[in-house]
Image (cartoon, rainbow, N blue to C red):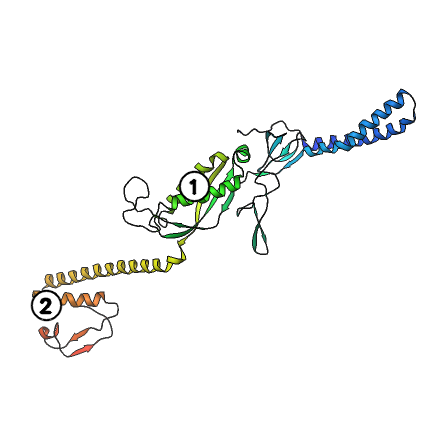
Amino acid sequence: MTEKIINKRPNGMLALVLLIIAYIAAIVLAVLCGLGLENEGALGTLYGIGLAVFAVYLIVGWLLFGGLKTLKPQEALVLTLFGKYYGTLKGEGFYWVNPFCQAFNPAAKTKLGQSGDVTTEKGSAATQSAGGMKISLKVMTLSNAKQKINDCLGNPVEIGIAVTWRVTDTAKAVFAVDNYKEFLSLQCDTALRDIVRIYPYDVAPNVDTTGDGLADDGSLRGSSEVVVKRIRDKIQENVKIAGLEIIEARITYLAYAPEIAAAMLQRQQASAIIDARKMIVDGAVGMVEMALERLSENHTVELDEERKAAMVSNLLVVLCGNKDAQPVVNSGSIYSGIFGISPVIICKKRFFC
């Protein structure tokens, strides 16, 4: 069903003034007709008919006031006439329409955790209908409860998203689905599950997240921009029939489920320790190579292969150790002191050759 905008809409203030004048005139004429009933003959009968007509108008004429409609900016009313779609009233102002038209909005009393539907009562979030039967055309944000979903590796992940959306076609929103707010909320949850199951929480080997058959580095934690774009596109595809536009989607919460959070933290810590150790070893090996090259170039000391190996071993122990080393300072012969046991001076300050 295509949205039909009501363009011919009389000014509500003018219609209100005319209705009030008509009511006052009907009261005055009804009183005059009542006074004229004393006349006999055709004139009295005519006064009687006039009194009956004006009395009926005074009884049912108030129904005409039901055609007065007030709209604020970015609001719309979907009107039906005897069960058929009459049109959509848009644009802020005071208007008068067919008084037999009824506003229809099945989602008026739907309570969602979103902007426009939320009020705060003593710190608790309570939801209520937004403006009776009026449909808000403003940009709103929907934030559903976080969900527990298994990623592509089977690890349970808790994730929550916030979706920014608005109504673009009021006719589709009202008539294409039973309740467009509940429909949007459900589609957000299903789209989130569909996309999250494609990605691992963190980068993992041999995982294809793009569907091209090649492993990539996609992950929920590291590829958030790509993930939310795919979630937005998926939601937009699902809610297109309801006349809704998804402007943006953002991840508001992402973490491992509590039952595996501790184990995953240990895993991440172990990975970080391994990476740090690898960096330390690489640096230490580079420093040892530099020391041997400088000693050889400057002919500072001539070392055979056995003493070079001992020197490398000692330097690696010093450079790669967890604690500060207490070096042994040789005070005797160079051949008995560099790699052997000799009288020593223990120095508290770390150093290397």
Residue 307: numbered disc? 2
Q: Is residue 79 visible?
A: yes
Q: CA distance from mark 2 to mark 1?
A: 66 Å
Q: Position of residue 283 (x, y in %)?
A: 22, 60
Q: Position of residue 31 (x, y in %)?
A: 86, 31
**Callout 1 secondary element:** helix
Question: Which residue shows up at 40% across the image and 54% down it?
Answer: 255
Q: Quadrant of residue 332?
A: bottom left
Residue 232: numbered disc? 1
Q: Position of residue 244 (x, y in %)?
A: 50, 37
34 in relation to 148, above or below: above
Amino acid at pointer 2? Arg
- Label 2 or label 1, whichever comes before in sequence order: 1
Question: Which residue shows up at 86% across the image and 26% down it?
Answer: 48
Q: Quadrant of residue 289?
A: bottom left
Name the side, left or right, on which 193 lies relative to 96.
Answer: left
**Callout 2 secondary element:** helix
**Number of residues whose C-alpha sits closer than 10 Å to that of mark 1, classed few (under 14), some (14–19) or many (20 or more):** many
Q: Nearer the viewer, mark 2 or mark 1?
A: 1
**Number of residues whose C-alpha sits closer than 10 Å to that of mark 2, classed few (under 14), some (14–19) or many (20 or more):** some
Q: Position of residue 333 (x, y in %)?
A: 9, 76
Which residue extends farthest top?
A: 42
Q: Is residue 301 visible?
A: no
Question: Which residue shows up at 21% across the image and 68% down it?
Answer: 318
Residue 170: numbered disc? none
Amino acid at pointer 1? Arg
